[in-house]
Image (spheres, rainbow, N blue to C red):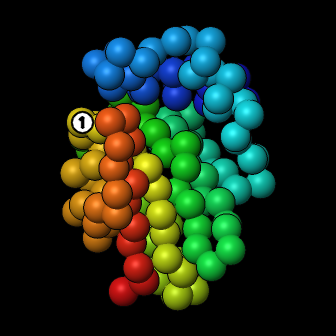
Amino acid sequence: MEPIVELRAIVMRPDLERLGRFDEHRVRQRFRDSFIPEHASVVLVDGAFAGCVALRPAEDEHWLEHFFIAPEVQGRGLGSAVLRTLLKQTDTDDVTVRLNVLQGSAARRLYERHGFTLERQDPVDVFMVRRPS
């Protein structure tokens, strides 16, 4: 799990620093406390670790969590490909997907391109929802 924890800290750092909320220990501990391996998938590129995503079932919906792609492979459509695959399955299962993303994160545009809409927000997080299509 350590490569996942390290990559998440690297990917999250710029947005958390921008919001004045980066604390390396806290970032790692929050991830360890909330990560459930049974709901996670590792993203590989040419056999090498390139990211992670989790789709956690909740009552009548799923939560998209811990979704990050290594900076060196971002911008190649990998995040969209992963998201399309997950959403195809949730659409088949007629399941709503929710997520939260940090305010000002470029990831929000990715989620909006894939049908997520604003549900609510606070000074730190934007909560989004996507109903099955």
Q: Position of residue 50 (x, y in %)?
A: 49, 36
Using the image, determine if residue 1 lies above or below residue 108. Answer: above
Using the image, determine if residue 5 lies above or below residue 65. Answer: above
Residue 103: image quadrant is top left
Badge 1, how many Cα within 10 Å: few under 14, some, many 20+?
Answer: some
Which quadrant would the C terminus be assigned to in this image?
bottom left
**Residue type (three-letter) at the residue carrying disc 1:** Gly
The number of numbered discs placed on residues in the rendered structure image is: 1
Residue beneath the point at 42% across and 18% down: 21
Q: Position of residue 119 (x, y in %)?
A: 34, 63
Residue underneath mark 1: 104
Q: Residue furthest top?
A: 24
Q: Is residue 99 left or right of residue 34?
A: left
Q: Judge whether residue 82 can be spotted in this image.
A: no
Residue beneath the point at 49% across and 76% down: 96
Q: Is residue 108 left or right of residue 40?
A: left
Q: Return the residue nearer the eye: 120 or 131.
A: 120
Residue 123: image quadrant is top left
Residue beneath the point at 65% across and 60% down: 56
Q: Secondary structure at mark 1?
A: loop
Q: Return the residue nearer the eye: 3 or 24.
A: 24
